[in-house]
Image: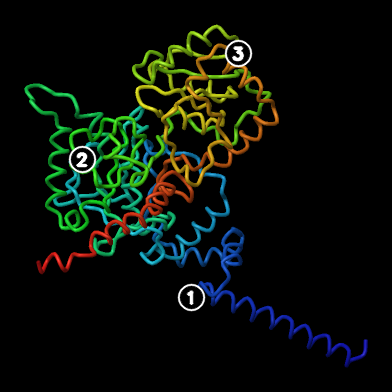
Amino acid sequence: MHPLSFMTKRFLFYVVFLSIFLLVFSCFTLLRSSSSYLIPESVLMLVLANKTSELSTQFRDHNTHHLDLLPPPPPTISRISVRRNSNSKKDARCLGEGRRKLCDSNQALLKVYMYDLPSQFHFGLLGWKGKKDQIWPDVRRHIPSYPGGLNLQHSVEYWLTLDLLSSNSPGVVRPCSAIRVTNSSHADVIFVPFFSSLSYNRHSKLHGKEKIGQNKVLQNELVDYLMRREEWRRGGGKDHVIVAHHPNSMLEARRKLGSAMFLLADFGRYPVEIANLKKDVIAPYMHVVPSVGNDSAPFEDRPILAYFQGAIHRKDGGMIRHKLYRLLKDEKDVHFAYGSVRENGIRHAGRGMASSRFCLNIAGDTPSSNRLFDAIVSHCVPVVISDDIELPFEDVLDYSEFCVFVRASDAVKKGFLLNLLRGIKRDEWTKMWERLKQIAHHFEYQYPSKQGDAVQMIWEAVARKISSVHLKLHKENRFHRAELIG
């Protein structure tokens, strides 16, 4: 080989090697620096996703050593937590953002001030006792468990409070939709952390020589507390958020606090001047049957045409259940039976829904029930027979894409309902089934919350109400100065 040719090739080899070394060193320096945002997020997430990359490991170790402080959730939380939703791109983005830095108020969609109510209004109802002067549990280390069974269906207040606490907790990775702020004047809304549904379920009955139940005592004390607060007086409570998901949970205080934004299951037991869609938010029940996740049976593997299991004899609008029972109980491809949580009732209901093409959601004592959300996570097309029902997030979700709606007056006509459901063939049903699989994660409560789950959807729904709240407050403040002088 000619000596000159050999030297040229050797020189080129060194140039290429040096270029590669400088490129790798530059990437490494950028990743280790605090200005990691100079790297396009798509490139950064690609590096983070590559578990074999040494650079990725070093980056995670440098920025997320505090994550090691977070213990695995206790068994009770694992039991009631749900599968991660299928929106992997959003999850990956959120995870990357959480690891790079904590959420701050400039990032958040919603800035929330939460009252430091004494623990008897919230986690104390779960039996939690903190140290002296400790109001909140350290959610990085211990999550007080929520009672199971049907108690879970109205646990909305629990998940929202956990989410706000975790928004300021290093090591808890969650979306930045809502963040807790410490100055109420900087907040978009004021959150009242009263576990009203749990209070009703556990303390509404009188015990011993009690003349007034603990649930009423707490509601009266809450009213007194709020009326003394400058935050309430400043806006008349219009920018306050109160969770009253159980229909009987705030019967004592709702009129006095009716100017606030309520988070409700429906409006069935509320007069329109107290609760309405203009100011309030409908929040989904937490489902009590397990999510089917990726084990969703297609059309051919669901032998049951229509499924209902629950209380049949109801009053008022729920009387339709008994009428439908008489019409459908003898149909071979219909399961219509009484059911309860006893004797593995929830497990049997979950299996039945997952084996059915349609699940009947019929009005009971109130227009709504958790049965709708059990059907959604079972990927069983809901058949909604409830004329007065209000649905969560309906301003952003078109329920007609994955539900069948039937007027009560039509449903009780002989043969009407069965003819309608049998007329929905495989292709049409499969289209609704596919849509159910896409939206089911919007109805999952979990800790920590995930992008697009029920917790985040509720915060986004609250944020969409803020402009109308501010409009009311600003109009009321027009003549404030003149009134002070007068």
Q: Position of residue 462 (x, y in %)?
A: 37, 50
Q: Residue 333, labelled with which disc?
A: 3
Q: Which residue is mark 1?
A: 35
Q: Nearer the viewer, residue 140 or 332?
A: 332
Q: Is residue 13 left or right of residue 198?
A: right
For the residue marked with disc 1, what is the amino acid?
Ser
Q: Position of residue 372 (x, y in %)?
A: 47, 30
- Counting residues from the N terminus, which is met first, the one under dot 1 or under dot 2? 1
Q: Position of residue 364 (x, y in %)?
A: 39, 22
For the residue marked with disc 2, what is the amino acid?
Gly
SS at circle 3: loop
Splitting the image into 4 quarters, where does residue 343 fall?
top left
Q: Residues within 10 Å of mark 2 (few under 14, many from 20)?
A: some
- How many numbered badges does the structure rendering display? 3
Depth check, mark 3 against mark 2: the one in front is 3
Q: Nearer the viewer, residue 236 or 454?
A: 236
Q: Position of residue 369 (x, y in %)?
A: 40, 28
Task: Work out whether 449 lies above or below 338.
Answer: below
- Counting residues from the N terminus, which is met first, the one under dot 1 or under dot 3? 1
Q: At 50% from the left edge and 60% from the top edge, which residue is drawn?
A: 96
